[in-house]
Amino acid sequence: MNISLKNITWVLFLLFSNMLVAQLNSSENDSVYKKLIKDYDQILSEINYQKEIISLRQMDLKRKLNNSHFLDTSSVNNPKKNQTGINASSKNESYTSKRQKIDVQRKKVKGYPVMGILNDTILFIHAKIGELTIEERASLISTKILELSEDDFLIIDSIQIMTSDDAFEIVYKEKTIMRVSESDAIWNNSEIRELAKNHHQKIVNSIVLGKIEKGFAKTLFRIGLILIVFVIAWLIFWLINRGYKKLAVNIQSNKEKWLKDLAYNNYTFLTEEQELNVILMFFKISRWLLYLVFLYISLPILFSIFPFSRAWAEILFSLVWLPFKSVLYAVWHFLPNLFSILVIFLVMRYFIKAVKYIFSEIEMEKLTIAGFHPDWSMPTYGIIRVLLYAFSFVLIFPYLPGSDSNIFKGVSVFIGILFSLGSSTAIANMVAGLVITYMRPFKIGDRIKIAQTSGDVIEKSLLVTRIKTSKNEIITIPNSSILAGNTVNYSSDVKNEGLIIYTTVTIGYDVPWKNMYEALIEAALKTQFILKEPKPFVLQTSLDDFYVSYQINSYTKTPNKQARIYSNLHQNIQDVCNERGIEILSPHYRSSRDGNMTTIPSNYIPKDYEAPAFNVNLNKL
């Protein structure tokens, strides 16, 4: 321990000296700094070595103390009593307990690699020694191997295996490279002696191979390989460029034969020149992609030639290979889930087809269900289909990759919030659409009136209803507005009794009501699309101060032609009244018949008609 404190103090002194020297002489700063760092590394290596020696001694002391506990009083009184058997029993029990502990730790403890001269892994360390952790022990062994390889006067045969207590040490002269303990042997499922020989051989091979790889002849050979790689890469790039130019010239010379305008009806999507530019751009991008691919392949090959740059080659190669490898592994592990998703999809698909077949039979009235109207079939099928799709998604969701990740959950919550906040009106319209579907206030083709809008229903969906007016105006009405108001359906009972068309005419009291009844019924029967049976009828709706209100009511089976029917009916009422000599006056029209012309059009009155003269009566006083 005194040695360690002394070394640490020396390191601190060197660092402090380095700071002073750097301030005094900046020109020599770099060389002094490098020398101090080298000395610092050497001292740290010595400190770690001392820590390892102290840890081993502590282990030996603990083991001796533990073995002393197995001695009983009889063995103290009688030292000759089977002392060898007790030691053997203690050793077996210690080995068994170690093995049990290590078997428990095999899945938890991570092994750390010991790196060779060529930056390759030569063995793994799983057990710690004393206060040294597994990682520190592996790093210390790697450092010692690297130091031996840099020794120009290294005698490879001097690397030997030495026995120390219950362990083996691989040493070079007086320097210990590594210690093989009983725990190492248990971790590797091997005998301690065989494991020591195996590690010794790997260390020797790594040092020998490293010296060979760093030889002058090998360096020249590698330089030659680099030149060959450069020549081959240049040749490949030249061939790609030349092939691209020939292909471009060939396409341009044959563009009239190979290319035509891409058009549909009278619209041209791409002309010949545009198609040529697209093709040339595609080949140009392909050329650069090939350049990048071969460059990416060439760089790892170049880096792998020299030992110091092989790690760069592995990193560069892993940038593409590791993601590709992870994708392949992910696809392979996802295959069982993919089969489960396919089974769920196929089963649900054919089940939905079976449900659609049943509802289509109901719609065509081949299958009758009491209380279930045929026009409910397709909307009900749509609702059931959405529910089945939602159920399928619930079944498939756990099998999707990343379904249990926080990102997936966050996106799901975000979409749910957007849907709930932004679709409240849409959901209200959807609910109203469902209610309207099962209320059956109208169907496609019916003539209806919603608020002040009248027209024929041309579309009915979950969100909106579209009607077409007599002026060919398409009006879209949200379903929630329809549900909140009143809807008049002119077509619902047309097949049974028909729709009653009615209009009101006001006639003065001087016209007999019977004559008016006959005139209005005659006018209705002359009107197109009005039924002869049931026969039209007249109602007197009011008796006002100056006139009587007559309402003519007639039946029709074509409610979609109401505008035309009303127009023809009004025309016929005027014609019939004029023919019958009935004047249709404004409600408050007053006249003296003497001296005034009739309001009947001239073509309906006799040619010899003369306006009556005024009658003046004078009373003599």
Image (tube, rainbow, N blue to C red):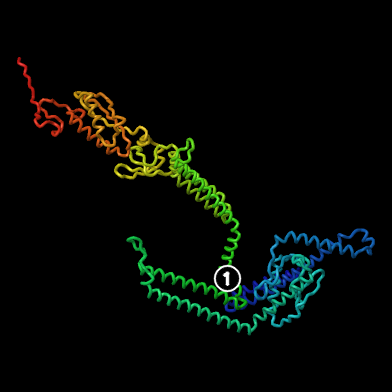
Which quarter of the figure has residue 334?
A: bottom right
Q: Secondary structure at mark 1?
A: helix
Q: Residue 118 appears at what percent x and percent y?
A: 65, 75
In the rendered view, tell whether residue 558 sits above or below residue 415. Answer: above
Q: Residue 146 appears at what percent x and percent y?
A: 68, 76
Which quarter of the figure has residue 450?
A: top left
For image coordinates 63% across by 83% down, the residue present is 218
Q: Residue 188 appears at what percent x and percent y?
A: 74, 67
Q: With 71 as the anchor, is 548 left or right in this view?
A: left
Q: Residue 341 appears at what percent x and percent y?
A: 56, 54
Give the quadrant of the N terminus.
bottom right
Total numbered badges shown on the rendered structure = 1
Residue identified by numbered label 1? 317
The 10 Å Cα crowd at callout 1, few under 14, some 14 to 19, many 20 or more, is some
Q: With 67 as the anchor, is 568 left or right in this view?
A: left
For image coordinates 73% across by 80% down, the residue present is 156
Front residue of this view, candidates 468 and 362: 362
At label 1, which amino acid type do we have?
Phe
Q: Residue furthest top?
A: 621
Front residue of this view, candidates 36 and 486: 486
Front residue of this view, candidates 121 and 522: 522
For image coordinates 53% across by 50% down, the residue present is 350
